[in-house]
């Protein structure tokens, strides 16, 4: 890796809106048939918050990329 490149992106995504979108338009996405993704999104919104965010971290080793995603 050349240098230390760090990027921080932050944006607000209302989970209720995402769940609504999936309920309304999920039927047009074949990979989502038979899943309860909208319910999972709503449950994530209820279980997380500023005091207890959900952290998803992917680290590909010493020379690989590192990605952290905070939900909450």
Image (tube, helix red, strand yellow):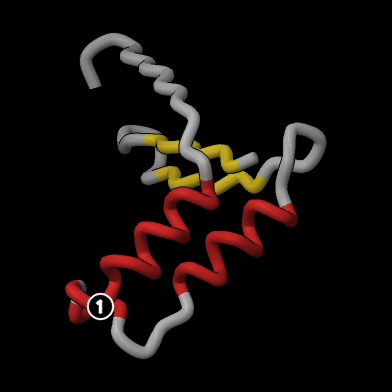
Residue at the spot 47% in from the left edge and 37% down from the top edge: 13
Element under disc 1 = helix
Give 60 or 48, whichever is nearer the viewer: 48
Image coordinates for residue 45, horizontal then vertical, percent: 64, 52
Dividing the image into 4 quarters, which one contains the C terminus?
A: top right
The single residue placed furthest to the top in the displayed view is: 3
Dividing the image into 4 quarters, which one contains the N terminus?
A: top left
Residue at the spot 40% in from the left edge and 22% down from the top edge: 9
Give 63 or 48, whichever is nearer the viewer: 48
From this view, report whether residue 28 is shown above or below residue 68.
Answer: below
Residue 3 in which image quadrant: top left
The single residue placed furthest to the right in the displayed view is: 51
Disc 1: which residue:
27
The single residue placed furthest to the front in the displayed view is: 24
Image coordinates for residue 46, horizontal then vertical, percent: 72, 55
Image coordinates for residue 37, horizontal then vertical, percent: 45, 71
Image coordinates for residue 11, horizontal then vertical, percent: 44, 26
Residue at the spot 39% in from the left edge and 69% down from the top edge: 23
Q: Is residue 65 left or right of residue 42?
A: left
Please tell me how crowded label 1 is: few (under 14), some (14-19), or many (20+) other residues with Cα within 10 Å.
few
Give 63 or 59, whichever is nearer the viewer: 59
Give 15 or 54, whichever is nearer the viewer: 15
């Amino acid at each position: 890796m050349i240098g230390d490149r760090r990027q921080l992106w932050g944006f607000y995504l209302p989970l209720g809106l995402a769940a609504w979108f999936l309920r309304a338009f999920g039927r047009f996405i074949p990979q989502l048939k038979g899943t309860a993704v909208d319910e999972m999104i709503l449950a994530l919104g209820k279980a997380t918050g500023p005091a207890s965010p959900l952290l998803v971290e992917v680290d590909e080793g010493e020379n690989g990329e590192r990605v952290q995603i905070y939900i909450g």
